[in-house]
Amino acid sequence: MKDGLPSPEMLDSIALAGTKAKGKRPYFFQDPDVERVLSITMAVAGELAVLRQRLDTIEELLQERGSLCKADIEAFAPDSAQQAARGRWTQEYLARILRIVQQEREALQRGDEPTSEEAGLSMTEDR
């Protein structure tokens, strides 16, 4: 940053981050506000998953070598066991994040529990 202004490279990165993917965007919910919150949540979840993998890389390299540099982190390639462990962690992580969606879907299929919307309405009606 020069004179408090971002560099042209930084501006290009920001512009690229906001570009729209090709094709139609998949929608999962009828309410556009819910879609936006889901989209933001999943973007943050993706960033956190990448950060978790990078931290795992750092831990592996420190345990193996005792020290590291940025080039070591960038060059690291997990072996098949590490890849499988990371894959399991990611699946469990996403399952925890999307647990409420899955539980509501299952409840709707069973027909034995009210949706969160129905529960919320019943709470406001009691007042």
Image: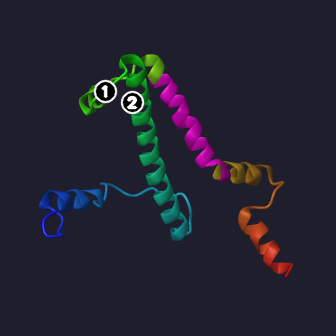
| Callout 1: SS | loop
Instruction: Residue at 19%, 58% (x, y): give it.
Output: 10
Work out whether mark 1 precedes mark 2 in sequence or the reverse, and give the earlier one: 2
The reply to whether dot 1 and dot 2 touch (C-beta < 8 Å) is yes
Q: Is residue 27 above or below residue 46?
A: below
Find disc 2 in the rendering and name its residue: 58
User: Along the horizontal axis of the image, is 85 left or right of 104?
Assistant: left
Find disc 1 in the rendering and name its residue: 68
| Callout 2: SS | helix
Q: Is residue 17 above or below residue 99?
A: below
For this orientation, the residue located farthest to the front is 66
Q: Is 97 covered by the magenta stretch?
A: yes
User: Along the horizontal axis of the image, is 16 left or right of 96?
Assistant: left
Instruction: Residue at 46%, 46% (x, y): give it.
Output: 48
Expressed as whole percent of the image width and height from the top left, the position of residue 29 reads 56, 62
Measured Cα–Cα span from mark 1 to mark 2: 8 Å
Expressed as whole percent of the image width and height from the top left, the position of residue 13 reads 22, 56
Main structural element of the magenta stretch: helix, strand or loop? helix
Front residue (pair 75, 71): 71
The nearer-to-camera label among 1 and 2 is 1
User: Along the horizontal axis of the image, is 108 left or right of 22?
Assistant: right
Instruction: Residue at 74%, 54% (x, y): give it.
Output: 108
Q: Is 49 covered by the magenta stretch?
A: no
Query: How many residues crowd around disc 1 within 10 Å: few (fewer than 14), some, or many (20 or more)?
Result: some
In magenta, the rendered stretch is 83-100
